[in-house]
């Protein structure tokens, strides 16, 4: 059961990720229906005894097997384009933070709300507490408020990295000398993990991302505590 669970998406925490999961299920349903039809037709061709030496063309059938796949592709294209533009849209962000990729750790800046910056390193196995996730826990989590539109500005200091948090539907390349941005909103509190998804060097697998989404009152207290 655990192995099957690893094949599914993480529980979505943002509206965009929910829509991505729905689109995945929608696409899989269409693929299963097409596969069942093709296998049924293939089995029928192998097992029936119908044949004719005088059928040279079948224009109606050719028209059908051209038009029907075109409509199937439209059923995939429209929700896909809608999601693409939704993921690229920034709806009046309430706050902005900056993530900078290094070999092999992340640093964060909260320059628009306070003068706060810190580095986030992965915790080694010998300092993990019971219940913490190996290779995913960090010494300083990125704390953000729930139910607010947040903009993340992503860049890198050395090579190309990728700031990726699957539960929030976020994946942005961190390119040296360039600022990329993405907006997201979390609908629930919790700790959401991610990792760099670019092959950025020997310790590529050891630069995790840990986002802690909390109510705004707790976020304000955390800011005051870390800026005193």
Image: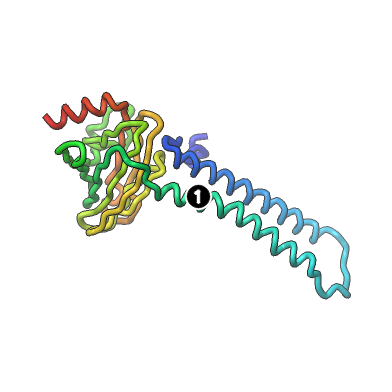
Q: In this view, does 49 lie to the left or right of 8?
A: right
- Residue 203: image x %, image y %? 26, 51
Number of marks in the image? 1
> Considering the numbered disc 1 on the image, is that residue within a helix, a strand or a loop?
helix
Q: Can residue 226 be seen by looking at this rendering?
A: yes
- Residue 103: image x %, image y %? 22, 52
Q: Is residue 26 above or below residue 59?
A: above
Q: Is residue 146 left or right of residue 72?
A: left
Nearer to the camera, 165 or 96:
96
Where the C terminus falls, by quadrant? Answer: top left
Nearer to the camera, 175 or 123:
175
Residue at 82% from the left image edge and 58% from the top image edge: 47
The residue where tag 1 is placed is 82
Q: Can residue 135 be seen by looking at this rendering?
A: no
- At label 1, counting other C-alpha atoms closer than 10 Å, the crowd grade (few under 14, some 14-19, many 20 or more) is few
- Residue 49: image x %, image y %? 88, 62
Residue at 33% from the left image edge and 45% from the top image edge: 195
Residue at 45% from the left image edge and 35% from the top image edge: 11
Residue 43's image quarter? Answer: bottom right
- Residue 124: image x %, image y %? 24, 38
Residue at 74% from the left image edge and 66% from the top image edge: 63
Residue 200's image quarter? Answer: bottom left
Q: In this view, does 111 lie to the left or right of 166?
A: left
State the residue lying farthest toward the front.
Answer: 92
């Amino acid at each position: 059961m655990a192995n099957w669970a690893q094949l599914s998406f993480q529980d979505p925490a943002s509206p965009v990720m929910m829509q991505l999961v729905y689109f995945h299920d929608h696409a899989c349903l269409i693929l299963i229906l097409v596969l069942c039809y093709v296998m049924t037709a293939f089995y029928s061709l192998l097992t029936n005894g119908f044949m004719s030496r005088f059928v040279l063309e079948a224009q109606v059938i050719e028209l059908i097997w051209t038009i029907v796949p075109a409509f199937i592709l439209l059923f995939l294209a429209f929700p896909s384009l809608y999601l693409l533009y939704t993921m690229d849209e920034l709806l009046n962000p309430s706050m902005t933070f900056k993530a900078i990729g290094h070999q092999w750790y992340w640093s964060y800046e909260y320059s628009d709300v306070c003068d706060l910056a810190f580095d986030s390193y992965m915790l080694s196995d010998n300092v993990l507490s019971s219940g913490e996730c190996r290779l995913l826990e960090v010494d300083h989590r990125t704390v953000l408020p729930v139910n607010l539109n947040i903009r993340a500005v992503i860049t890198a200091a050395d090579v190309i990295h990728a700031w990726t948090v699957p539960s929030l539907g976020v994946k942005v390349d961190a390119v040296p000398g360039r600022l990329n941005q993405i907006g997201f909103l979390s609908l629930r509190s919790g700790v959401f993990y991610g990792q760099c998804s670019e092959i950025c060097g020997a310790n590529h697998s050891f630069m995790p991302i840990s986002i802690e989404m909390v109510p705004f009152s707790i976020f304000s207290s955390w800011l005051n505590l870390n800026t005193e």
